[in-house]
Image: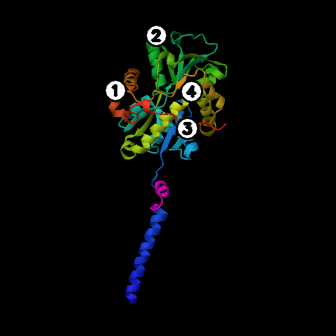
């Protein structure tokens, strides 16, 4: 063999060897799990430590226990402003978010899509235990704290007052972060507070708060928070969105299957995700058991048209975005097909 031919064959063999090595080490071409891991991109889901978002950590925890794959990366926030800005900066692939806020963002041109609900009910209005307020009519002339004007808690105040014939301008509304509400009620710097749980239960457990009403009493099947994704996620990562929605739906049915499951969730969520006293979550999830629900969470037009109408009346929505603009109900065609996770926490 000539020297030139030896060099040529040697060079060709070297190129082939390097290519195969690159495919094996960097591309995972000969290992399916390696290839999937290399191609996997983070799927970050924003949430707050509230019971309206409970299915987020429950889904992540159960899947991690079953298969060492939590499906997504849960990103905890302490308040809505931080969560909203992170979402708008395209640093989240999905998020739990206030329904009116998501609808308002769509009116502003943000391509957001609601794909599932976070819960039903799960909100209470609290007054001080020694308050003379005994009914919704007694709120006339009083000061009420709401989370913010884009919360459905604000809309339920509008609805509750309207249903009792109270003119909205006859009450004073202040916006306040929900974690600050129990202290404000304790000091009686406000007459009533309303937010998602567990902050209302905190006042109740503390012995100084009294429930004026639960949302199930004045707005049955109330929705506060929804699961939403950027529209681009549906186009580019639909399978990931579907897997997320399936997991959230299965977690909801797992939670509502038994009180034992709710107590298990209270413990592992409080310890690993919310960093709260598990007694607080246990209280919210059991007193009464339907204080918050995690089934019947399919995106339905009539629910959002009601929010649209109230939002417009309250001045937080313009009415320029409608159901087809901000919602995609295709991920759960029939909720009866959803089965709860088959998992029990170790004893």
Q: CA distance from mark 4 to mark 1?
A: 29 Å
- Position of residue 55 relative to residue 233, above or below, is above
Query: Compared with residue 305, is residue 56 higher up or lower down, i.e. above or below?
Result: below
Q: Alpha-carbon distance for marks 3 and 4?
A: 16 Å
Residue 72 image label: none
211 lies above or below 283: above
Secondary structure of residue under mark 1: loop
Q: CA distance from mark 3 to mark 2?
A: 38 Å
Disc 1 crowd rating (10 Å Cα; few below 14, some 14-19, many 20+) is some
Q: Which tag is nearer the camera, tag 3 or tag 1?
A: 3
Percent position (x, y) of residue 258? Answer: 57, 27
Dot 2 corresponds to which residue? Answer: 164
Count neighbours of disc 2 (C-alpha within 10 A) and say few if under 14, some if 14 to 19, many if 20 or more: few
Badge 4, how many Cα within 10 Å: few under 14, some, many 20+? Answer: many
Location of residue 339 with respect to 169 vertically, above or below = below
Q: Earlier in the sequence, mark 3 or mark 4?
A: 3
Tag shown at residue 57: 3
Whole-percent x, y for residue 56 in the image: 52, 37
Split into 4 quadrants, where in the image is the N terminus? bottom left
Secondary element at tag 3? helix
The residue labelled by disc 1 is 319
Q: Position of residue 347 (x, y in %)?
A: 67, 36
Left-right relation of 85 to 317: right
């Amino acid at each position: 063999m000539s020297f030139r031919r030896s060099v040529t064959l040697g060079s060709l063999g070297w190129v082939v060897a390097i290519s195969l090595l690159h495919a094996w080490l960097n591309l995972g071409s000969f290992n399916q799990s390696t290839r999937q891991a290399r191609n996997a991109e983070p799927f970050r889901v924003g949430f707050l430590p509230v019971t309206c978002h409970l299915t987020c950590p429950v889904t992540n925890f159960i899947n991690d226990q079953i298969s060492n794959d939590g499906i997504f990366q849960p990103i905890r926030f302490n308040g809505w402003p931080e969560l909203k800005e992170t979402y708008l900066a395209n640093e989240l692939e999905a998020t739990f978010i206030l329904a009116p806020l998501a609808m308002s963002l769509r009116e502003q041109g943000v391509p957001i899509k609601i794909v599932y609900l976070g819960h039903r009910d799960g909100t209470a209005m609290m007054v001080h235990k020694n308050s003379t307020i005994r009914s919704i009519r007694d709120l006339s002339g009083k000061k009420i704290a709401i989370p913010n004007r884009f919360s459905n808690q604000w809309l339920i105040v509008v609805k509750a007052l309207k249903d009792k014939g109270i003119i909205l301008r006859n009450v004073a509304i202040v916006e306040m972060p929900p974690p600050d509400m129990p202290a404000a009620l304790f000091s009686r710097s406000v007459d009533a507070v309303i937010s998602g749980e567990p902050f209302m239960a905190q006042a109740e457990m503390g012995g100084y708060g009294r429930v004026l009403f639960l949302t199930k009493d004045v707005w049955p099947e109330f929705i506060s928070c929804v699961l939403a994704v950027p529209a681009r996620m549906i186009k580019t990562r639909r399978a990931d969105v579907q897997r997320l929605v399936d997991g959230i739906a299965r977690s909801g049915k797992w939670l509502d299957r038994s009180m034992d499951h709710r107590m298990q969730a209270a413990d592992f969520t409080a310890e690993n995700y919310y960093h709260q006293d598990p007694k607080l979550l246990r209280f919210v999830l059991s007193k009464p058991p339907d204080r918050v629900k995690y089934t019947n969470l399919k995106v339905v037009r009539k629910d959002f048209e009601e929010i649209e109408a109230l939002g417009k009346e309250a001045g937080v929505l313009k009415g320029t975005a409608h159901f087809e603009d901000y919602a995609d109900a295709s991920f759960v065609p029939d909720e009866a097909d959803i089965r709860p996770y088959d998992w029990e926490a170790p004893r």
